[in-house]
Amino acid sequence: MSSVALTTLGCKVNQCESAFLEEKLSAAGFLLCSFAEKADLYCINTCAVTSRAAMQSRQLIRRAVRQNPKARVVVMGCYPQIAAEEIATIPGITHILGTTEKLSLLDYLGPPEKNVPPCIHIKDARKAPEPTPLVVSSFAHRTRAFLKIQDGCDAFCSYCVVPYARGRSRSISLQSILEQVQRFLDHNYQEIVLTGIHLGHWGLDLKPRQGLVDLLRAIFHQSPPARFRLSSLEPGEITPELLELMATTPELCPHLHIPLQSGDSSVLSRMNRHYHPNSYRELVVGATHRIPDLAVGVDVLVGFPGETDECFQNTYRLIESLPVAYLHIFPFSPRPTTPAATMKEQVAPALIRQRCQFLRELDQKKRLTFMQRFLGKIRPVLVENRRDQASGMHCGFSDNYLPVLVQANSGSENRVLMARLDRLEETKLVAIPI
């Protein structure tokens, strides 16, 4: 039996696709093993959103080749889609697959041929066909299931390579999604995360045209014994209808991840993002007023070309004033084919690092403030199948995305328990089941 090691970088959509491929490989007779082990086949499911992700992909490629120079090494996904020729110069690679082709991985696996150029199979992402529903039964070592409902993006933010790597926005059909939801429920998943490259555009290309609220209502009509979480949504896609559904549906977790990127209107305009900092403020304040326990996560892109000290301060002050739960902070890195890569007034890397540090310190304050709000409160907590190394307690997440340590008995894994958020131990929230 041939062994295969598959590793994944990047977003939840990549995680969904890797889970699909692992099941396909296993069904084809491959023995799944750790990427740290010697394998006959290595698969690197890459990310291209940042230069760091591309660098990590190259490191993993070289690591695979070192571990077994005779193995087949497949590099697939977003990074090859935009930089196949660059990747092909790395010795030891046997196959390079694009974002669409990787889902047919088994069709491309030929015998390993060393000292010859790798087999490259990449088509134009903008001409990609309708997305294939991913039939997945389980996620190895994960308590939560990720369900891909959409692929591609039509936004073309000036810094973002994703539309070039993933193609146009395409939706999975409602029926396919409902079937996958049931499949996860049949395998006893207690939380399902709906994810996509541009999640809020689900259904806009379907006939008849549909929207995310339509999908959620169809899911809840089945009365599933599980909770559902949404991944990232753009500011303009969070409607009063969606907020009302979240406020009145216990199965829909009170958690929104809303990218900001910049709190300066001039920077947002150059980013080709179509909202104003004031409208973002109104959205977050209004959402947290309607749903008081709501966790709001924020993406921030630091050091976009032309970001002056004043621009950065506008971003900092906006976030500081808002009731947000956490930040995801990304330093700007120029990506090939994007307009921002050639813009003037590129910000010095040292200044970007300094600004990122300021925001990381703000992030820690926001996280601590949000956790302190819920001390003594009772929340539903999903107990995960992993433990904290220092305390030995189970790890878990509340419905509003509070990471907690749970003083729970063995056998509590993959169960939603009502728990009192008892105390903070340094930066960790400890929950006691009731």
Image (spheres, rainbow, N blue to C red):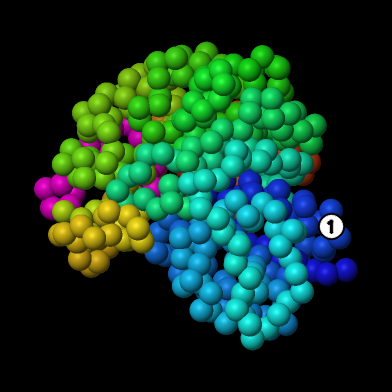
Which residue matches tag 1? Answer: 28
Q: Quadrant of the N terminus?
A: bottom right
Q: Does residue 243 sit above or below 62 in this rendering?
A: above
Residue 431 falls in image quadrant = top right
Amino acid residing under circle 1: Ala
Q: Quadrant of the C terminus?
A: top right
Image coordinates for residue 107, horizontal then vertical, percent: 74, 58
Residue 101 falls in image quadrant = bottom right
Q: Does residue 71 sit above or below 348 in this rendering?
A: below
From the viewer's side, name the closer residue of 376 and 342. 342
| Label 1 Cα neighbours within 10 Å, binned few <14 / some 14-19 / many ≥20 | few
Residue appearing at x 44%, y 19% in the figure: 243
From the viewer's side, name the closer residue of 416 and 26. 26
Image coordinates for residue 375, horizontal then vertical, percent: 47, 32
Element marked by disc 1: loop
From the viewer's side, name the closer residue of 401 and 337. 337
Q: Does residue 77 sit above or below 222 in this rendering?
A: below
> In the drawing, does residue 430 fall left or right of residue 367?
right
Residue appearing at x 56%, y 18% in the figure: 208
Q: Residue furthest bottom?
A: 115
Image coordinates for residue 312, horizontal then vertical, percent: 18, 49
Q: Does residue 274 sit above or below 2 in this rendering?
A: above
Specify start and end residues of the magenta stretch as a single range: 307-328
Q: Assess whether residue 116 is covered by the magenta stretch.
A: no
